[in-house]
């Protein structure tokens, strides 16, 4: 069983949803980024998503755009991110790691080589924002050959007719985008989440994580109980950014504050009873 | 419309929106259903007689089409002066700078805004570089009573002030974009972000033959009115087709519009002129085809200026309309199969051509077609006098006079 499947199965048995954290690799520098990543499992993150910086992140709001710029300034490259994962994997064996990014840096690295090297570094899944199911053959054969899950986004705009096509191209878990919009700009309408997830669940047995509008522990707890997980990204990135000095460098607060926030999110999720099993 | 021949170069794109390996639909899932909706609506509009008639009516009575074909007699004579005896091709201009709003952009904008109305969209967004596409979109929205938001890089807002004010007069809201180098690429990112957030009521009016399928095809089809007219006009004027077509390439819409109807005319050579900025061998140019590599940006696979890690690098051109690190996917395909030759013209060459055109022909061109003209200036003297060059004079220079004055060291 893949690390992703194993993790969601274990959490289901525990009766709670997953906390999926997103942070951009190399934000604000490699050493701090690694320290935070290494601290995430202990703070309660169940799945670790790492953003691969790109100059033109079309689906991201200002917070994650800036995180990507900081990462690039700190020297993030595709091989650099893979190396970061390798170092994280040296001590963290069980927590699934998912890379989230845009297609062009992977394409420049070479898709086959990227999938091979990512799997070897300890990556479990990929979210390639700008490769929809219509273009899946670009990456699916290589991802599959190396045992990488291809996690896809389902948006509020994804209609019933389209759903089977998207679900058919998804493995690992489904990332349900709770808002129409870019990351971090709106907050989800929680009343409409439960029916939306229930509708989705009629079509798939894959775990569903909700993301894009989740900021607070309360919101994370709701999302993780109506679905199988909550993805928190912008809120963590904002916390990280607020600890930086005037030049955008890490301070002594950076890793501890981010990890404290993760702890808070995790506690809320653990405290929440899973609504419907 | 003619039925394409089996071995025609005019059949693209395929069902996936590909021209060869280029093009496609590389967008986030949130946009995907919308892209498919636009494609469906456009396919229906193509054969909708009422839609086509309304678009043609606007082109005739609002834009002022057909635009004239002009034999640039004084320029031709001037270029012959320094040519060898018997040399110096005849130069013709396709005068799309005479269109309402001053460039070719309005041709495709009117088609797209009609489509948006047909789709029931009530809010229009656009990106702009030089401001010509923004002005055209603001104009069409004023005419058709739709709210219009134009994303424009802050750098471009600065260097294209007249067009910013025009858009405001036309009732559009101009939103300066400060990310990246704050030029056209960044404006397009912001346009896509807006669209993702407002898919239910918004139509994104893209200004060139780029973006996800069906935009490259749709914008090309609308702009092909340029080449269709030019073909007929040239046959009437000279009794034959031109020997070569020359057009500036930013995203590539004016060039595709001129080239497309001639693609199967094997004896017609084609030159796409990219902005070589401070020189093709410097890092400051916008020559995606001459100096870039294939990659994926803004919804399609195409040639891009990028570093070894696949990060997009900044383009540079004196012309805001050419200052883009990518190019439409059909051009990438035409480049790879060798049907069109892509060349460069530097900032300085374009400035010289800008001035020459003004003095020889009494036409102040936009800086974008001044790049095409710079290539004509190099090419014409090397060809016999009975050869015919047809250049797309796709925009007028009113918007550029401040930029040019600054480069010439004058204050106005
Ligand atoms: C007059 C003019 N020509 C050319 C361009 C470049 O676009 P394209 O290559 O799509 O024709 C622009 C863009 O703003 C323009 O205003």
Image: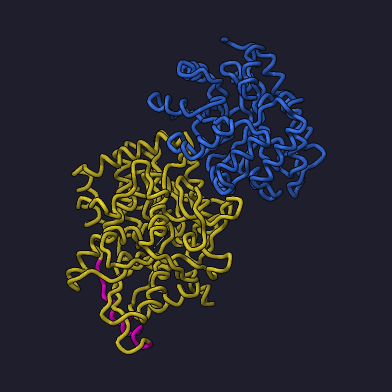
Chain colours: A blue, B yellow
Q: Which residues are magenta?
A: B68-82
Q: Is residue A32 left or right of residue B128?
A: right
Residue B69 visible, this angle: yes
x, y percentage for residue B137?
Answer: 37, 51
Q: Quadrant of residue A61?
A: top right
Residue ranking furthest to the right: A252
Q: Quadrant of residue A123?
A: top right
The residue at the point 42 percent across, 36 percent down is A134
Q: Nearer the viewer, residue B320 or A151?
A: A151
x, y percentage for residue B263?
Answer: 29, 60
Q: In the rendered structure, does residue A79 fall within the stretch colored magenta? A: no
The residue at the point 19 percent across, 72 percent down is B237
Residue ranking furthest to the bottom: B85
Would you say the magenta stretch is mainly helix, strand or loop? Answer: helix
Establish if B26 lies above or below A187.
below
x, y percentage for residue B375?
Answer: 40, 73
């Amino acid at each position: 069983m893949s690390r992703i499947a194993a993790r969601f199965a274990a959490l289901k048995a525990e009766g709670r949803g997953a906390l999926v954290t997103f942070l951009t690799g190399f934000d604000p520098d490699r050493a701090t980024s690694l320290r935070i990543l290494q601290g995430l499992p202990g703070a309660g993150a169940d799945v670790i998503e790492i953003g691969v910086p790109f100059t033109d992140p079309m689906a991201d709001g200002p917070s994650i755009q800036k995180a990507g710029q900081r990462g690039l300034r700190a020297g993030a490259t595709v091989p650099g991110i893979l190396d970061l994962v390798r170092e994280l994997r040296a001590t963290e064996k069980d927590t699934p790691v998912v890379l989230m990014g845009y297609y062009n840096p992977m394409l420049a690295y070479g898709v086959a080589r990227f999938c091979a090297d990512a799997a070897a570094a300890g990556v479990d899944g990929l979210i390639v924002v700008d490769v929809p199911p219509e273009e899946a053959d670009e990456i699916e054969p290589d991802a599959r050959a190396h045992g990488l899950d291809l996690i896809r986004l389902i948006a509020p705009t994804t209609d019933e007719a389209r759903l089977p096509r998207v679900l058919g191209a998804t493995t690992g878990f489904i990332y349900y985008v709770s808002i129409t919009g870019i990351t971090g700009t709106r907050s989800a309408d929680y009343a409409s989440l439960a029916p939306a997830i229930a509708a989705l669940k009629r079509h798939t047995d894959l775990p569903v994580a909700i993301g894009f509008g989740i900021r607070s522990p309360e919101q994370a707890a709701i999302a993780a109980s109506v679905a199988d997980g909550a993805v928190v990204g912008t809120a963590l990135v904002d916390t990280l950014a607020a600890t930086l000095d005037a030049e955008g460098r890490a301070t002594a607060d950076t890793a501890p504050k981010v990890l404290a926030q993760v702890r808070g999110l995790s506690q809320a999720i653990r405290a929440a009873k899973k609504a419907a099993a | 419309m003619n039925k394409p021949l089996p071995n025609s170069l005019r059949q693209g794109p395929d069902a996936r929106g590909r021209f060869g390996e280029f093009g496609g639909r590389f967008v986030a899932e949130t946009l995907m259903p919308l892209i498919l909706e636009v494609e469906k609506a456009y396919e229906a509009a193509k054969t909708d007689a009422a839609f086509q008639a309304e678009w043609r009516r606007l082109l005739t009575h609002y834009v002022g089409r057909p635009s004239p074909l002009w034999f640039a007699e004084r320029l031709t004579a001037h270029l012959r002066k320094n040519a060898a005896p018997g040399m110096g091709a005849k130069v013709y201009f396709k005068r799309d700078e005479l269109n309402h709003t001053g460039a070719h952009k309005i041709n495709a904008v009117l088609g797209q805004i009609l489509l948006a109305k047909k789709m029931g969209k009530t809010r229009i967004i656009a990106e702009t570089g030089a401001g010509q596409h923004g002005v055209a979109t603001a104009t069409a929205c004023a005419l058709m009573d739709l709210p219009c938001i134009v994303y424009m890089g802050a750098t471009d807002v600065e260097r294209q002030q007249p067009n910013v004010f025009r858009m405001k007069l036309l009732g559009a809201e101009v939103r300066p974009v400060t990310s990246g180098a704050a030029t056209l690429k960044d404006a397009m990112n912001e346009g896509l972000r807006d669209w993702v957030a407002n898919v239910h009521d918004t139509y994104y009016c893209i200004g060139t033959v780029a973006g996800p399928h069906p935009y490259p095809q749709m914008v090309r089809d609308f702009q092909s009115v340029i080449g269709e007219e030019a073909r007929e006009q040239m046959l009437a004027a000279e009794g034959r087709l031109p020997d070569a077509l020359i057009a500036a390439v930013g995203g590539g819409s004016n060039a595709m519009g001129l080239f497309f109807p001639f693609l199967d005319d094997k004896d017609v050579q084609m030159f796409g002129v990219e902005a070589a900025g401070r020189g093709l061998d410097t890092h400051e140019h916008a020559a995606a085809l001459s100096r870039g590599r294939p990659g994926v940006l803004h919804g399609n696979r195409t040639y891009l200026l990028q570093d070894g890690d696949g990060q997009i690098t900044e383009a540079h051109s004196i012309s805001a309309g050419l200052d883009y690190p990518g190019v439409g996917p059909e051009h990438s395909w035409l480049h790879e199969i060798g049907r069109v030759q892509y060349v460069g013209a530097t900032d300085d060459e374009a400035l010289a051509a800008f001035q020459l055109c003004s003095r020889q022909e009494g036409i102040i061109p936009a800086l974008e077609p001044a790049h095409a003209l710079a290539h004509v200036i190099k090419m014409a003297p090397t060809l016999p006098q009975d050869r015919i060059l047809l250049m797309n004079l796709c925009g007028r220079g009113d918007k550029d006079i401040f930029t040019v004055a600054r480069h010439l060291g004058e204050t106005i």
